[in-house]
Image (cartoon, rainbow, N blue to C red):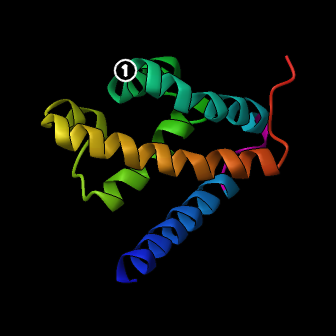
Amino acid sequence: MAQLTRQQTLQQKRAAYAWAAIEKVPSNIQKQYGSLVRGLPALIQSDGLGAALAFLKAKAAGKQDKPHMVAYNHITGWVQQELEVKGDFLEWLLNQPSTDYRRATTEVLAYLNWIKRFAEAKGWKDEG
């Protein structure tokens, strides 16, 4: 029973963090952000977490208001808090043993599930 309660608490923490993140997405990128985060889990599963994070960083080109950078910051913010990662998450990830890499991937996918749900609930999707 203690494990179930801990799991519920972790899910609640993910949900609360995701909701707070979603609420801060600038209105001019909400639709693009919604479309992007809906596709991220598939990208992570096909190419790997490291490649997906590198893709987000490359597409953002350092611009903080692009949906790719916003998504990258949301993912890294959660993981840095939850897995106690110091510094850049992508750099940290690339230097981890496979067990930690898999754990991080599992955590990111669970977090993205909430982000996706909330973006869909807000109706954020790019029609084009």
Identify the image quadrant of residue 101: top left
Judged left or right of residue 12, residue 119 is: right
| Residue visible at 54% across and 38% down in the picture | 71
Q: Nearer the viewer, residue 88 or 34?
A: 34
Instruction: Identify the magenta region.
Output: 24-28
Magenta residue check for 25: yes
- For badge 1, the amino acid type reads Ala
For mark 1, what is the residue? Answer: 51
How far across and how far down the image is residue 78, in percent?
A: 42, 55
| Residue visible at 34% across and 60% down in the picture | 82
Judged left or right of residue 73, residue 65 is: right
How far across and how far down the image is residue 25, in percent?
A: 67, 47
Name above or below for residue 94 compared with residue 75. Answer: above
How far across and how far down the image is residue 89, in percent?
A: 29, 41
Q: Is residue 66 visible?
A: no
Magenta residue check for 31: no
Q: Residue most toward the front?
A: 1
**Dominant secondary structure, magenta:** loop
Q: Nearer the viewer, residue 56 or 101?
A: 101
Where is the N terminus found, in terms of image quarters?
bottom left
Judged left or right of residue 67, residue 90 is: left
Name above or below for residue 11 compared with residue 28. Answer: below
| Residue visible at 33% across and 26% down in the picture | 50
Where is the C terminus found, in terms of image quarters?
top right
